[in-house]
Image (tube, rainbow, N blue to C red):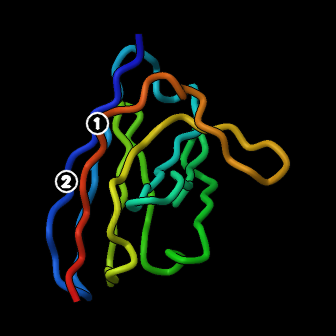
Amino acid sequence: QVQLVESGGGLVQTGGFLRLSCAVSGRTLSTYAMGWFHQAPGKEREVVATISQSGDSTYYADSVKGRFTISRDNAKNTVYLQMNSLKPEDTAVYYCNAVQEINSYYYAIWSNSWGQGTQVTVSS
């Protein structure tokens, strides 16, 4: 069974930075495109960034483009999200999951195996 463990969140001021990590066990990471999602209170979970199996292709939501960078280390079965120039609207719980793109929409492959997420809070 796949397990996802997100870490690295915290409380930062506007303009600050954080680096999130997602450790994956139970699957060979290199087989999957991966993504980071966030969910703010009262809102649906939505994709923030994705990265292809080899890491040579990425996607970013318009709201984070130019500020966030997704990367992966397949040897360590870990995916990262570098978050710079953080804004209060980035406040959310962040999750990772394997992703599949269908008609320009990204779906979580392991939809029954979400991790606990990591809370990111950006103060103004």
Residue drawn at (58%, 66%) of the image: 60
User: Residue 46 location in percent, x, y?
Assistant: 55, 55
On screen, residue 104 versus residue 30, left or right, reads: right
**Rendered view: 33 above or below 4:** below
User: Residue 96 location in percent, x, y?
Assistant: 42, 42
In the rendered view of the protein, which quadrant contains the N terminus? Answer: top left
- Mark 2–mark 1 Cα distance, whole angstroms, equals 12 Å
Q: Which residue is mark 2?
A: 8
Q: In front here: 102 or 88?
A: 88
User: Residue 87 location in percent, x, y?
Assistant: 34, 83
Q: Which mark is residue 116?
A: 1
Q: Categorize mark 1 by other alpha carbons within 10 Å: few (<14), some (14-19), many (20+).
A: some
* Residue type at the position of mark 1: Gln
On screen, residue 37 versus residue 83, left or right, reads: right
Quadrant for residue 6, please give it.
top left
Residue 26 shows in the view: yes
Q: In front here: 92 or 8?
A: 92
Q: Residue furthest right?
A: 103
Residue drawn at (61%, 76%) of the image: 62
Residue drawn at (46%, 20%) of the image: 28
Quadrant for residue 74, please give it.
top left
Residue 76 shows in the view: no
Q: In front here: 91 or 110?
A: 91
* Residue type at the position of mark 2: Gly
On screen, residue 30 versus residue 23, left or right, reads: right
Q: Secondary structure at mark 2?
A: loop
User: Residue 61 location in percent, x, y?
Assistant: 59, 68
**N-terminal-most mark, 2 or 1:** 2
Residue drawn at (68%, 37%) of the image: 100
